[in-house]
Image (cartoon, grey):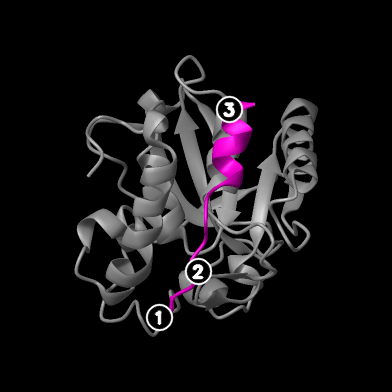
Amino acid sequence: MKFLKAGILLAITLFTTSCESKIKNKIEPAKEVVLAEKFSKQDLQKYETAYFASGCFWCVEAIFESVKGVKEVISGYSGGTEENPTYEQVSYGRTSHAEAVEVYYDPTEISYIELVQVFFGSHDPTSLNRQGPDRGAQYRSIAFYKNPEEKKIIETYMVALEESGNYEDPIVTEVTAFTKFYNAEDYHQDYERKNPNNSYVRQVSIPRLNRFKKNFPDYLKKEVH
């Protein structure tokens, strides 16, 4: 299958800087998330949602934002049990949550299967509690499902990846029922786009986004930066 081949061939490179709080300094968080100007909360209600975690949400948000059919991506926290987690708590591993993204998409333009391909093709699913320089369970790989159909899609795709022989190590992605998503603080939203000179963004986020764009050119929006 074409989408499987593209996802399997994506290479993952490790870097030396980190996405943790010591990089994200001197920025005061806002209390509410401000969505993209072209979409209101009411506008977004007409779209489907999907939830993924695969490392620093700066990187993951930028990748999904570049995909055609994706209308909005929100950075946040999910996969844990604590209510109303903060960035400081999650980034230092003081909760059971992972940095995650909420993806609003139009199923007439892109399917859930294709979003799963984007997810697996844009990170290393064999890396346990780590993506690139970011270490800890807060950066673990999780594919959240909202219904049995989504769960089947994820699990079927994972079996195909395992059987492909392209990974030396087993896939460690968690397949988890979605329960609750907490928006991250406002200053995290669209961070890669708004802060291109940040050291982590230059060394990790942008290269990761560029690798994705190189491997998935057919999935990109025309206006991707």
Pointer 3: what residue? 2
Q: Answer whether residue 70 is visible to the viewer in this image.
A: yes
Q: Residue at x 38, y 26 (%)?
A: 42
- Residue 139 lies, with reference to residue 39, above or below; the image says below
Pointer 2: what residue? 86
For the C terminus, which image quadrant? Answer: top left
Give the prevailing secondary structure in the magenta stretch. Answer: loop
The boundaries of the magenta stretch are: 1-18
Q: Residue at x 70, y 34 (%)?
A: 146
Image check: 97 left or right of 186?
Answer: right
Alpha carbon separation for disc pair 2 and 1: 22 Å
- Residue 22 lies, with reference to residue 149, above or below; the image says below
Which one is closest to the eye, mark 2 or mark 1? 1
Pointer 1: what residue? 17
Cβ atoms under marks 2 and 1 closer than 8 Å: no
Alpha carbon separation for disc pair 1 and 3: 34 Å
- Element at label 3: helix
Q: Position of residue 1 (x, y in %)?
A: 65, 26
Q: Answer whether residue 31 is visible to the viewer in this image.
A: no
- Element at label 1: loop
Q: Amino acid at mark 3?
A: Lys
User: In the depicted view, which residue is nearer to us: 198 or 167?
Assistant: 167
Mark toward the start of the polypeptide (3 vs 2): 3
